[in-house]
Every structure is written in C-alpha cells, then in structure tokens.
Amino acid sequence: MNKTNLLIILCFFLFTTAKSQTSDSVVLKKKYFTQRLNGEITLDGIPNEGAWDAVEWGGDFIQWQPGEGKDPSQETSFKILYDNNFLYIGYRCHDRSPDSINKFMGRRDVFPGDWVEINIDSYHDQRTGFSFTLSVSGVRSDEFISENGNNWDASWNPIWFAKTHIDDKGWTGEVKIPLSQLRYSKEAEKVWGIQVTRRLFRKEERSTWQYIPQKLGVWVSGFGELHGLKDIPFHRQVEIAPYVVAQAEKYKKEDGNPFATGFDKKLSAGVDGKVAVTNDLILDFTINPDFGQVEADPSQVRIDGFQNFFEERRPFFIESRNIFDYSLTNSVAGGDYDADLLFYSRRIGSSPHGYPNTTGNDYVKMPLNTSILGAAKFSGKTKNGLSIGILESITERETATVDNNGQRRKELVEPMTNYFVTRIQKDIKAGNTVLGAIFTGVNREKGLGDLLHRNAYSGGVDFLHFWKNRAYYFRGNIIFSHVNGTKEAIYNTQTSFEHLFQRLNAKEVEPDNNRTSLTGMGGTFKIGKSGGKGGKNGEVLRFETGVTVRSPELELNDIGFMLTSNEINHFTWAGIRWPRSFSIFRNASINYNHWLRWDFGGQFLYNAFNVNGHVTFKNNWQTGTGTTWNPYDISNTALRGGSSLRRPAGIGQFAYIRTDYTKKVNVNLQTNFFWGFDNTIVGNNLNLTVTIQPTNALNINLTAAYSDYWRRLDQFVSNVTYNNMTRTIVGEVKQKTLRFVGRLNYNITPDLTLQYYGQPFITRPRYNNFGYVSDPLAKKYDDRFHVFSQNEISYDNVNNQYLVDETGDGVTDYTFNKPDFNFVQFRSNLVVRWEYKPGSELYLVWSQGSTPDAFGDLDTPLTKSLFSNAFADQARNILLIKWTYRFLR
C-alpha cells in the first residue's frame, strides 16, 4: 500500500510540475509562394535557368543545432517550381570556405557529409511527410515521416532525380520529384506543409527555414506552408519491375549424401509492382520474391530461454512498414517488456517449423526458408485523415525429401499459410486526437497439427490525445488474441516458455490437455509530457508513466513477437534535456526510470531504478553513463516451468565515450557491467568500434565485442523426474562471447556502390557445480539450492551425461546431459549494386557462411577456436546475380 501511495504521489508531482512549465505560445508559420514552371530546366545542379526567376528565393534560416535560435554560420536559400508532372527545388548553399565543404559519399539513405533536405507534408495532416535529402556528393536519401516526426522510415525509396555543383560561393543543387511519388488530395488549389533543413558537417550545425523550437517536442505540425499549387492532375502511378536471379552455390561435398554433391544452381524470376489506385492510396505487390541481396542476420545465441529478435531487412516488408507498426507498449522507459509486436513480418517466410522422422540411414534435403508465393500491400491516407494499411501474403506448402539407400519420400515440414494484417487510423482535429485499430490473421491448411495452430487471430484498438499545444499526451491500447488447433498444439502452447502454465507455484493458471483454443488480452495506458515552456537553455521536464498488462493466455507469436505473458508492468520515465549549447556542452540530458512487475496471481516479481546522463561537448565528443539498482527480482521463466525463482539483487553500470564523428577517424567505446550482491553474478561487456573514412568514397567500420558472464549457481540446466516429482537442475555457468564485425562501403559513383559485411562469432558457456532447486523463493541465496556432493554426481564420458545418485545406494536415480557447448559461426556478404536507371538495379552478390561442428571444442582458447573453425574449408559460398528493370508510367 505504501508503494502504491508513493507511485501516486510521484506521478502527481511529475504531472503538476510539468504542467506549470507548459507554454501556449505559437510560433508564426512562414509561407512560400510557388509558381507553375514556364520554360525549361536542365537538371545539372545549377539553378540558373530563366524559369527560376518566376519565384523568389526562400531564406532567413535559423540555427536549430547547436545554437538554437541563433543565426546560422552560412546562409541558405531555395526556390520551388512545379508543372503537371514534377516538383522542382533549387538550392543555393552559401559557404565562405568552399574548400571545407565535406563531400563524403555513402550508399543511399546514409546522409553523408554536407546536405540539404526538404520535408513535404503533402497530405497537410500535420503528422506525416515525405523527406528528400541531397548530399553535396550527389548521394540521395529519402524517408517517410510519421507520428509528427517521432518515426523516420528510411526504407521508403521513391524515384526522384538530383544533381549538385560546387563553385566559389559554396554549392548548389537541383531536385526533380515526380508528383506520382507524393500523395495529395484533389483540391484545385493546394496548401502543403514544408520544411527545409541544411547540415553543415564540419560544425555539425543544422539550420531550418521554419523555426520549430525543440522544447515543443513536435516536427511536422510545425512546418511552414507552400502556397500556389494549382490544378495539379491526379497521377496514376504504375511501376512494374520484373527480375531474374541466377544463383550458384558451392559447399563441401558429403560422401554418401545424395543431396550434398558440393554444387547447386538455380534460376528464378518474379515481379514487383506498385499501382496508385487513387491520389491517396497505393497497391504494392510481389510475386515469387527473392531477397538474395539482403545482408545476413547477425549471429545470436541465448541461454535464458527467450527467443531472438531479428530486424526485418527484406525490401518489400520494410518499405512503408510504419503503417503496420503496432507495439503493445512503445514506452520511452524501454525494457524487455517493451518488445511485443502484433505484426512481426519476419514470421512470413521463416524457417519451417517441422522436421521429418528419420533413422540413422536417412539423408534429408530440408528447405532453409518457407517460400513466399506472393504478397500485396494496400496503403495510404485520405484527405479526411483516414490511414489504411492492408497486407496479405501466402507461403508455400513445404516438404522435406528423405533418402534411404535410394528410396525417397517426402514429409510435410510447413503447411501452406495465409497471413493477413489490416491497420487503420483516423486523425481528428488536425491530429490532436488519433483513433486506430488493427486486426491480424493466420490461417493454415491441415498438417503439423501437433506443432502449429490451425488459426491465429489478434487485434486491438488504440488512441492518442494531445493537449496544451501537444505538450501533453494520453495514449493507450487494448489488444486481444485467439488461437485454435488440436489438443496437442494448444497444450504445447500452454506449456511453452512464453506461458509455462505448468509452473509449480502458479495459482492463476494450470495446463488443460483438453483445450483446443486460447484467448488472451493485453493493453497499455500511459500519460506523458513531451514539450512545453523551456528554461534559459531550452531545457524542459518531460515524463511518461503508465501500466502494461499481458494476460496468461495472450499469444502473438504466429504473426507477431512476444517474449512472455502473465505480467502487469508499471513504468515511469522522467528526463530533462538541454538542447542548446552552454558552457563546454553542445547538449546534455539526465533521465530517471523505474519499473515494477507483478503476475496475474498477485506475486510481486520485480523492481528496478535507473538514473543516467549524456552529454555532447562542443568539440562533438560524446559520453554518458548510467546506473541501475535491482533490489528485487523473481523470475517465472528462469526454471522453465519448475517454479518461480528468486534471483539475486544487484547493480549495473554502463558507460560510453565517442570521439568526434565528423573526423575521418572516430572511436566509440562502450562498457556494461552488472554485479549480483553476495558474489552471485558478474557480467562484463566491452564493445569497441572504429570508423575510418580514408577518402570521400570509402568508409570502413570495424567492431570488436567481448562479453564475460558468470552466475554462481542459479543457471537452469534441465528438468528431470525423480520420485514422481520434478527436479530442476541448476549450476554455475561461465559464458564467454566474442564477435568481430567488419563493414566496408565504397562509392564508385552515387549510384554504383560496393558493400562488404563480415562477422565471425563464437560463444561458449561452461557449466560446473551442479545442484537442484530446493527452496526457490528462500530469502537467502544459498538456501534456495542443494549442491551435489562428489558422492552424489559423476560424469559418463561415453554418453556425455551426468549421473546422479541422491540416495547414495550406488544406483543412478536420474541423469542429465552435459550442457556445455561451443558455437562458432561466420557470415559475410559482398554486394555490388548499380542503379543503372532510376528504380532499375543490377546486383552482384557473393555470400559466404559457415557454422562448423565445433560444439565439443571446449578447451581451445576462445580466439583460436573462433578463427580455426570459422575459416576452415567448410564454408558455403553463394554467387548470385539479380537484374531488375522498372517500367514507369
């Protein structure tokens, strides 16, 4: 009760304190008046044609960083014209030291060196926009802006044209944007929101045409206005891009294995397309997609039971993905409980869930991924503020081929599956209130009924409301899930790691092997402050506090991502940021967080408190540190259903320092440490990254990461049956992990690039001092476990297992396998990408991967084991050529 009162008082204090700082001031919006193009413009980067004289230069930029509100170091001007097909922008970026202009190059969407950018709110909804960035080196970058500037999606890749030129006054640029790439309403005379931003790289200075004070915490809603657009016709955008892929694969031949001959080849084709249905709505589709040019996932191994999360990298799914984003929490406070998504596109086309039944003489040809037959997206936003997103995809029925002395059979490993997602949002009162909903569905044909749900549905409704000039917000959602299938599939879900209904001390749930469905719910409600009246250096108190709930039967993993269920979480964050430079600082911030957690049985699980601070100095060096105190921690998952386990209290510390990132060589050092009280846990993480830019066209990034993790006794090993009871075996673990990552980007031209990515990885957990859990919730650490004596446990070298004789009668009571392993992996990609025509590309790809059989290589020093195994003569090499040609209308 005292904790509850304390939380209420704290939240009331944050709310009232922040409210007293709110400002009702409104920044005057600037206006730019354009004209229809009369004449010719040659796109050469020099806006000197007579047609440009029809409009005035827009200017009077104001510094946004670091000296907010001050005059910029260099002046910037722009002009805008249009015709029935294009929007034209001309830039004049003055620079009194042209030799100091930074001309770094990079692949598309990396924003290198000096650049100038225009953001266009063509919907004029004050929440979304289209961003076009032009570097002086000619590199184009583009993003779709949503959530009033809180989300910038660089996966959006429109077709547009640009050139630059350097002279004795600075540099100039010309941009030509097809109106078919924008979305707008049908009014005869339109008003769009615009913002123009310039980056002066050598000073890391940004100036804007429309001043938007950082203390307001907004972006798109603060844009200036573009007037004069008249009688622009509707452009029915039609883009069809067929492709052809030729692939050859070489690997180590296996004697006797008819499927491992050492060489495979494949030729495939497909088509991608984009069709504008109306001015506002567009249909994207792909048939038989291929993503061979996509960078490999980083290696990840966890021993805590939680599933790995991998970022989406496939172009079809990352473009416009913000429309389908639906996080249960999306909290500023962060934490693992913030990871749940109703739609996680990596579920589509993932590895098959099944595996064939085999004997010792069988050889198996197993598909690595489920084939996507086709997918389509329908998305856009209407003038009245209604956003729509619909996605549907069908994956192939996959079978494995099993060979036994020449006799072959096929076994189902993944049924044909349909995935469906629909998302809608409605802006009310210029986006000050937003209402939304989402629905997802997964429907599978019969097959693998003991492993997979036959159907899985989820959905939710959400709202967001701003007040006090968007300084305050109230946000929330309520979601549901429903899965059905065979009794075996539903029982497996109940007892899976995410649910653990069989947990011995669970009062609120128990497994039922007769059920054929599960229905769960969840939700988040939070209140926060993101802007307001600032102090002398623009500092504003911001905060967010709320509650997230996940019921025990909530299940999202058929099409979403969910780490765990059966939780009630409270979170609070408060912070102050100084955006303006002062003293020796360019900017600074301090933050406070706390988290509390319960389960649905009323058991208090967790609390933690964190403070952290970050500064950027005027010389562009950055540093920060933070401390987390975790006084109480009970895990419902640590023993995989055996029982809840009280884990040691402890304290963690992180720190980092980064040198000036505008220099040709910069270094980033990060450290993270955690100590459990009473000598129970020690965790050390060290990450060093060196970035080198030897020439404008070449960028090299090298990372080395090492972690050393030790738990004295409470690491889960196995659950075994003894005397009709569950014995949960635990032990001491020492896990060492080493990772190297190398990246190289070389720009031959802005449209012809060479990229390399390579990552050798090793992790090795070693176990010792085994025992079993005797009193999992005991207050004293040593009272929670019984440690096996030398007379109780022995090791069987032949079968790699431990034998336990608890009674001392010389008869083995139970066994468990040796849990130690050594995992080594190497992954790399070399990609040559040539955009030989806007939207049309040629890829040359060499991929090399190796996951050697090094599990038993436990005594070799870590680094030696990594390099002797990762680069052994057993790698799988893939050479791929992909050609696409985009037809435009």
Image (cartoon, rainbow, N blue to C red):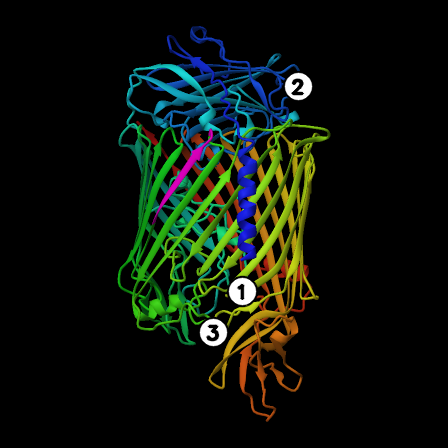
- Please, is residue 259 above or below residue 57 in the view? below
Residue 672 at least partly seen:
no
- Kindly identify which numbered label has been placed on residue 504: 3
The answer to whether 400 appears left or right of 211 in the picture is left
Q: Which residue is identified by label 2?
A: 99
Q: Nearer the viewer, residue 632 or 864?
A: 632
- Asked if the stretch drawn in magenta spans residue 462, the answer is yes
Part of the protein shown in magenta: 460-469
Upstream in the sequence, badge 1 or badge 3? Answer: 3
Tag 1 near tag 3, CB within 8 Å: no
- Kindly identify which numbered label has been placed on residue 674: none
Q: Decide: few, some or many residues near mark 1? Use Cα within 10 Å; few <14, some 14-19, many ≥20.
A: some
State the residue at coordinates (58%, 84%).
804
Residue type indicated by callout 3: Leu
- The percent position of residue 409, horizontal first and vertical second, equals 31, 69
Q: Which residue is identified by label 1?
A: 635
Secondary structure beneath label 2:
helix
Res 819 quadrant in image: bottom right
State the CA–CA distance, disc 1 to disc 3.
13 Å
Residue type indicated by callout 2: Asp
Upstream in the sequence, badge 3 or badge 2? Answer: 2
Secondary structure beneath label 3:
loop
State the CA–CA distance, disc 3 to disc 2.
71 Å
Q: Nearer the viewer, residue 96 or 773?
A: 773
State the residue at coordinates (42%, 46%).
291
Residue type indicated by callout 1: Ser
State the CA–CA distance, disc 1 to disc 2.
60 Å
- Please, is residue 448 above or below residue 46 in the view? below
Secondary structure beneath label 1:
strand
- The percent position of residue 787, horizontal first and vertical second, equals 64, 79
- The percent position of residue 189, horizontal first and vertical second, equals 32, 16
